[in-house]
Image (cartoon, grey):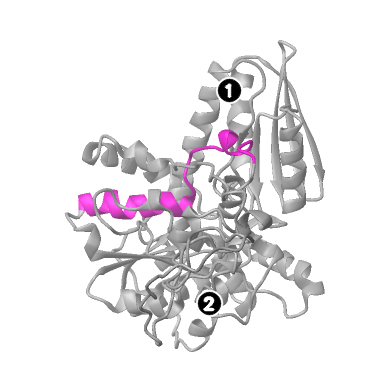
Amino acid sequence: MGGVVKLADVSDFITPSQACILPMPGQSDKPKSSLVKLREKSKKPIVKPDEKIMVTLKDCLACSGCVTTAETVLIQSQTAEEMLSGLASDKMGFVTVSPQALASLAAELDMSISDMAVMVARYFKVKGASYVIDSSFGRYFSLMESLTELKSRLESRNGKEMLISGICPGFVCYAEKRKQNDVVPMISSIRSPQAITGALIKDFLVRKMNLDPRSVYHVALMPCYDKKLEASRADFSVNGVDVQETDCVVTPSELLPLLKEFEHDGGLMTSGNEINWLNSLEFGEVIGDYEGETSGGYTKFILDALTRTFKENSQLVDVKTESQNDLERFTLNLTNGQSLTLLKAYGFRNIQNLVRRIQQRKNEVDYVEVMACPKGCLNGGGQIRNPEPALQDQRVLKVKEVYKQATRRDLLESEYLQVREEWESLNPSFRDLLVAKIKHVEGPAANTVAAMAW
């Protein structure tokens, strides 16, 4: 999952597994039996020879017949070609850009992250986009809501109750399709930066600009193929309209060949004279992550906020930190003898250990920031890989150094409250669009082929 698996020589068409439980034309959806039965007369289904049988991503999300990495679920509609077609259409184009994706492209092309931002913004605007947005602004909404959610839990709970971040689509997909419904109840309902930016565009900006959401096309440049999966979730669609909040997701690996062919003179192509959350990338200003973090900084953001609160109330004794192999543990010891524990758990090995402790009912942790990819989003499956797998760690270090150049966090605080207040005035129920509907997917019937793989 995530950076562990990389498929480089496949098309964007899904090849359904033999164990797929969705009924295909010419295939009965009834389980086969080994008993001998009398032949029954039946009408043959009419299937055109040249008809392609397609399974959409929505089908796979609703189906529990397969447990696979999100990177093997490739989507016909989310390709670079479809992206270019959508941006060239008569719809108003928006592009959300992850700073981690920018860092990967910059490291590959030996550019600063600022110059890369200008180039990417110019490329998308030449192709038809009206706005190119840093996903960090949506992430700030996600961080603030995550902090509010945890504080609410801490005030109302009895004993330790684990809260796990739900911003990594690879982890969410894994948790939802686990045979036991043991992890989903602990996952935070707060949306990821990509999903919140989708809501900002197709609810907030659509209302503010008096647009029809069907006349808006939203592309996201993300470091992970799993984000394609996330964009296709049914709960991330515009209410009452059959369109997704994010129409197409592409990754740095998919965008790189297009950028290499793009003639860029280094000049700015900006929307307005003042820098704001809608045009900062056009000026080469990249907001970046929280306090040197690389995957959103959820644990660190919450840790710092809680530390400040406990210090102000003279309740904090000390904060202890432990770190080992993509696992970081922070413990806040309080004057009343209690403690709060926050984790960062990256990579599937650490996720498996976390799930094992959940199964053993060892809930000694209060909050966990989970990423399916080892080393987090900078090493996402859609990032540009080193041709030599053994040298991938060196590539990630180079990307990390470039990522440190993104330091315009001041753009967040200055506009966040203003946009939030305006959004609430346009849509009093806007907070409903900041949460996801994460739910357990029931397994297939025990007598199906799919159940054997489940």
Please, what is the three-letter code of the amino acid marked with disc 1?
Thr
Inter-mark Cα distance, 2 to 1: 44 Å
* Picture layout, residue 238 above or below residue 154: below
Report the disc number at residue 351: none
User: Looking at the image, which residue is at 29% across and 54% down?
Assistant: 202
* Picture layout, residue 335 above or below residue 64: above
User: Looking at the image, which residue is at 64% across and 44% down?
Assistant: 179
Q: Secondary structure at mark 2?
A: helix
* Picture layout, residue 100 above or below residue 414: below
Task: Please rate how many residues cluster around mark 2, counting C-alpha atoms within 10 Å: few if below 14, some from 14 to 19, many from 20.
Answer: some
Which residue is disc 2 drawn over? Answer: 254
The image quadrant where one finds the N terminus is bottom right
- Asked if residue 234 lies in the magenta stretch, the reply is no
- Tell which of 86 and 257 is nearer to you: 86
Q: Residue 154 appears in which quarter of the rendering? A: top right
User: Quick check: 282 left or right of 317?
Assistant: left
* Residue 165 locus on image (x, y percent): 58, 41
Report the disc number at residue 309: 1
* Residue 75 locus on image (x, y percent): 48, 70
User: Looking at the image, which residue is at 65% across and 38% down?
Assistant: 368
- Tell which of 358 and 127 is nearer to you: 358
Q: Residue 246 appears in which quarter of the rendering? A: bottom left
- Tell which of 453 and 228 is nearer to you: 453
For marks 2 and 1, give the one nearer the viewer.
Answer: 2
Q: Looking at the magenta stretch, what is its main secondary structure?
A: helix
Give the mark nearer the N terminus: 2 vs 1. 2
Task: Please rate how many residues cluster around mark 1, counting C-alpha atoms within 10 Å: few if below 14, some from 14 to 19, many from 20.
Answer: few
User: Quick check: 66 left or right of 246?
Assistant: right
Magenta span of residues: 180-208
* Residue 423 locus on image (x, y percent): 28, 42
Please, what is the three-letter code of the amino acid marked with disc 2?
Glu
